[in-house]
Image: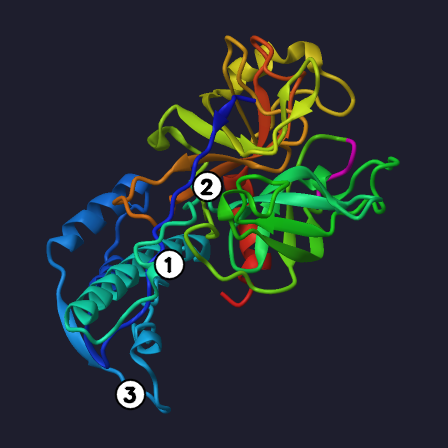
Amino acid sequence: MGYIIVLFSVLLVSNVCSSKRTISKRNAEYGEKIRKEDFKETGRGIEDKYNSFLNESTTEKITTKNPIERNSVSECYDDYTIKPDFKAPGRRISEAKCLEYIWMRNHRWDRKIEVHECITKLIADNKYNPPPATVGGRDAFTGEFPHMGGVGWRSRNGTWLFRCGCSLISSKFTLTAAHCSKSPRDTDIENTVPEVVRLGDKNIMDFDSQKFDPRDAKILRIIVHPSYSAPKKYFDIALMEIEERSYFSSNVQPACLWGQFDTSELGTSATLTGWGVVETATRRTSVVLQAAVVDIINSEKCNNLLRSACNRHWCGVLEHQICAGKLAGGVDACQGDSGGPLQVKIPLPDNDEGSMHYVIGVTSFGIGCALPDLPGVYTRVSSFIDWIESIVWPES
């Protein structure tokens, strides 16, 4: 795949706030407005609604009541904001969750601003003396693709081998390819079934690099789509449930699921990400997350280009698949990228709480890697929304 190194940056803010403070109602009101209004929830629609909402933002005073004696540092983190209910008649649960994730992202950013303003005031009033080592500290980076995860197998020497990618889509579930649910037997791994999902990392092999705080979430169960039948390459989609709920941050937050068959309103290109092969001649893999922009190719053209690849395991693009690549060659997903997302960035107001993306496809397979006129084939997420929702959000 392409050799674009994804860089991350984060704003670390200190602590402190007074017992009476002004807390923005911006995100709550925004959530209430979009919950009540009927509008098409495309990325551009979300941005327009959000921008118009910012111009109407108001604040209210909240008085915190601390049950125990608290110092000014801990009081800063009291947060009594009520999360809006994004459910609405006719709105899919995956769409409501997308709006909820966007609200949470923006709320985290608002809280950081409030905390920072609180600190500044207390320091100016000589009510707080922060430790010199942490004043203005910026010792981590925000994830550009905070939903990106690596699927890990336990190696025989006790380390992890990350052979697939995945996308975090809720606090408990990641989305990946069905063929990533099991690895062929080889001498490098202890078990053919993956055991962990690594989240919040850029350098997949190094916990300390750039002071990241990656999390290894143990896989509780893997749900493969019932129509998938290996080694065939259709219905190549699966869900991985992790044992403990993942808390969201600038480095770890879910992606949204694109629920419409037509992707044209998102544009004609998308981005693929992974830690897979970056040199097809040497099979060298990258420990640093790679990102590459590819073109979405219509199914008829894709079928014509891949006609020679027809065999008993795959013979033509079906409706639940989507093609993408660079027909000139040189950019593609490759071994190790399977299960990772084909995604489009949601245009939201910039802040340091990470980007949000629509996942439109799951990396499935290709004919070679980055060869001219041979696009990659991805599982189309919109074709499986009902199945995904029934497992990830069954109560809804």
Q: How far separated are the C-alphas under marks 1 and 2?
A: 29 Å
Secondary element type, mark 2: loop
- First in sequence: mark 2 vs mark 3: 3
- The colour scheme applied to this rendered structure is rainbow
Please identify the dominant SS of the magenta region: loop
Residue 278 can be seen in this image: yes
The CA span between labels 3 and 1 is 31 Å
Name the residue that disc number 1 marks. Answer: 133
Q: Do residues under tags 2 and 3 come within 8 Å of each other at their CB atoms? A: no
The magenta segment: 227-231
Q: Tell me which residue sits at (70%, 30%) in the image.
A: 233
- Mark 1 belongs to which amino acid? Ala
What residue is pinned by disc 3? Answer: 65
Q: Is 355 on the left-hand or right-hand side of 173?
A: left
Tell me which amino acid carries mark 3.
Answer: Lys
Q: Position of residue 129 (x, y in %)?
A: 27, 70
Determine the image quadrant of residue 107.
bottom left
Task: Read off the residue under disc 2.
Answer: 145
Seen in the picture, residue 204 relative to 213 is either above or below; the reply is: above
Report the front residue among 94 and 334. 334
N-terminal label among 1 and 2: 1
Q: Residues within 10 Å of mark 1 (few under 14, many from 20)?
A: few
Circle nearer the viewer, 1 or 2: 1
